[in-house]
Image (spheres, grey):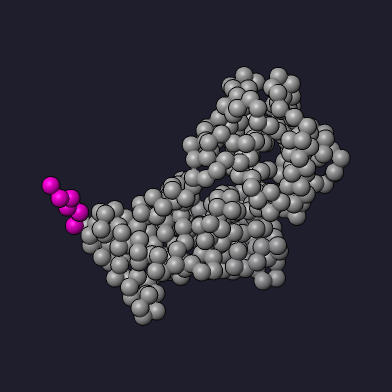
Amino acid sequence: MPFVRPRALRRRLAVLLLALVTVIGGGVSIPVTHLAPGTASAEAAGRADYDKSVGASDCALLGRAYSPALGCARDGCVPGAVLWRKVPGAEACALPGQPRGYGYAATVDARRCGQLHRRWIAAVNYCASEPDRSRAMLVGAPQCASGASVYVTLAEKPGHYDECVNRGQAAALVHRAAANGTTPAEELARDQRHADDGPAGVLAVGDSLTWRGNDELIDLWPELTVDGEPARRPTELATRIRAYEAHHGAPTGLVVELGSNPAPGYGRADLSRAVADVPADIPVLLVLPYAEVDGSPTTVSAWSRRFRGWMRSVAAGRPHTCVADWPAYVERHLGLLQDGLHVRNDAEAEWAQWLVDQWAACSSSV
């Protein structure tokens, strides 16, 4: 029995196709994203902190208010938006009423952001994202990098990242969706899943420290796969390794930068089992965590101290395993951190170089 597409789906795809044909043939744009630089009021200027390293266009992509004299507001959003990401040096806004976890920016790594033809906001280490999740396709989207102008909304997760395409590709997606009884987003996700496969290499799994330095790490170490996410807990380590193996096979090396974020119930045995997921003959580098309490260098969190002990113990009991003493480096370089945990934005390259050097020393000695 032949498949019959729902009437509503056919109508929607026809509207999309007509709009794209109009755009491509006549240069008339369908509705575009609403992003535009916000203006900070005099009242806001008196109470807000500003970041001059974030320009007007990047500030707009973050949904933050902008003052030509002061820069991009850290805790002030454009009208209609609310502060979402509040971590110092990585602030971003969101639209109220949207699905939880979505805002003006996404923690897609720098390499993947480029592959998706989306704008990378280097000052805050975000990939520009569409905050209004009800929009299926946007033409002339400012989140798109040069050469692509149509933003397609998916789900902002591996295999389903939002992606920018050119107008010809957008029309082709609509045609394929009409032929297959799907949506352009589903067709694009199918393409992404095939593109994610590739040969194995070294995998780095980390939290916000790794995420913030991912573009600098990629510049220094192009073959590295950087899997960093803010607030990531060590409970996710085994899952991230398995996710990598599903597309690439076992990594040829593993860097673990976790332990700053507490995970109640997690212990040394859990860390050991996660590391045991990779073959025993590949090198593993465990980066000792450093997290101050209330930003005081005299008080380091008891959790991170405990996790350091587990890392040292796992390294001692597994061949081809080293530890990288990040706490010792921090203590020798006062002022490196901006809040007792995260490296200053202008020192992310220093962090990346330190990690690359640590890996070089480890892999040559094990």
The residue sitting at 60% across, 24% down in the picture is 276
> Where 341 sits versus 61, above or below?
above
- Residue 62 is at least partly visible in this image: no
The residue sitting at 65% across, 20% down in the picture is 268
Relative side of 184 to 261, left or right: left
In the picture, the quarter occupied by the C terminus is top right
State the residue in front, 318 or 155.
Answer: 318
- Residue 21 is at least partly visible in this image: yes
Relative side of 33 to 309, left or right: left
The residue sitting at 62% across, 36% down in the picture is 252
State the residue in front, 342 or 114.
Answer: 114
Is residue 329 within the magenta segment? Answer: no
State the residue in front, 39 or 177.
Answer: 177
Relative side of 280 to 130, left or right: right
**Which SS does the magenta portion mostly show?**
loop
Q: Position of residue 313 (x, y in %)?
A: 72, 21
- Extreme residue toward the right, this view: 332
Q: Position of residue 193 (x, y in %)?
A: 43, 47
Q: Position of residue 260 (x, y in %)?
A: 68, 34
The residue sitting at 66% across, 43% down in the picture is 210
- Extreme residue toward the left, this view: 1
Magenta range is: 1-7
Figure disc tally? 0
Q: Position of residue 350 (x, y in %)?
A: 78, 49
